[in-house]
Image (cartoon, rainbow, N blue to C red):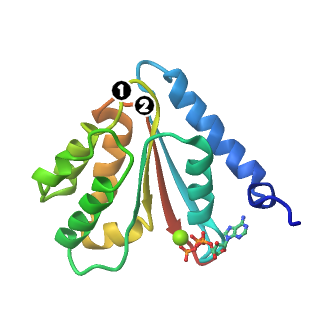
């Protein structure tokens, strides 16, 4: 008999830190701005993606997990993002079936409408630097959405990026 998989995962400190942030989002945050945005940076294959997957699985909240990849254009990034939202557990994800956003600003506005008001949700942008490579404005758009543009949304944003040092 082996050790149960969940118990052997480790990363207790990191999972607890993510859990604390999600609890802050759940409680409603400061000044009517419950949203939180975090960036997870680490060397290739250190376990960034698995950490977030494990966190989401344990948290059991509505979420979208989008893994960016080396695509030729922002248009392709947006199509793949829309597909990820459509197959996600966000309550109103179906709006992405009728509309194809042409900019990240439009995509995140549409996403905002899919997030539940009553409880926390998580948006994961794994491998975010690929999105910035195609659209240098992406990071700024993302930042403004995660903090200001929809202050009512109880959303935790997790982005990941590789570093080589
Ligand atoms: N805590 C863990 N326990 C056991 N295996 C793990 C753990 N974390 C990650 N792994 C395994 O290590 C490998 C690399 O993990 P992962 O893909 O999450 O790394 P990453 O940092 O996201 O890599 P990349 O920079 O290439 O995106 C995967 O096979 C994953 O299943
Ligand atoms: Mg990864």
Q: Residue at x 63, y 46 (%)?
A: 58
Depicted 1 relative to depicted 21: above or below: below
Q: Earlier in the sequence, mark 2 or mark 1?
A: 1
- Residue 137: tell me if it is visible: no
- Circle on res. 154: 2
Residue 66 seen in this snapshot: yes
Q: Residues within 10 Å of mark 2 (few under 14, many from 20)?
A: many
Give above or below for 150 relative to 32: below
> How far apart, in angstroms, are the residues tagged by discs 2 and 1?
7 Å
Q: Quadrant of the C terminus?
A: bottom right
Q: Quadrant of residue 121?
A: top left
- Measured from the top left, where is residue 28 in percent x and y? 49, 22
Q: Secondary structure at mark 1?
A: loop
**Where is the N terminus found, in terms of image quarters?**
bottom right
Residue at screen point 21% across, 66% down: 79
- CB under 8 Å between discs 2 and 1: yes
| Nearer the observer, 44 or 6 | 6
């Amino acid at each position: 008999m082996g050790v149960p998989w969940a118990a052997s995962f480790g990363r207790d400190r990191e999972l607890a830190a993510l859990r604390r942030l999600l609890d802050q989002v759940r409680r409603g945050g400061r000044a009517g701005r419950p949203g939180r945005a975090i960036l997870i940076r680490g060397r290739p294959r250190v376990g960034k993606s698995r950490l977030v997957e494990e966190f989401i699985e344990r948290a059991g909240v509505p979420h979208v997990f989008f893994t960016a990849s080396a695509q030729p254009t922002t248009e392709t990034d947006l199509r793949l993002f829309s597909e990820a939202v459509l197959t996600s557990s966000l309550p109103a994800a179906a709006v992405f079936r009728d509309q194809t956003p042409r900019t990240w600003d439009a995509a995140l506005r549409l996403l905002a409408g899919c997030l539940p008001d009553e409880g926390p949700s998580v948006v994961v942008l794994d491998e975010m630097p690929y999105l910035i490579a195609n659209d240098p404005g992406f990071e700024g758009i993302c930042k403004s959405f995660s903090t200001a543009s929809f202050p009512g949304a109880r959303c935790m944003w997790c982005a990941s990026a590789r570093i080589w040092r």
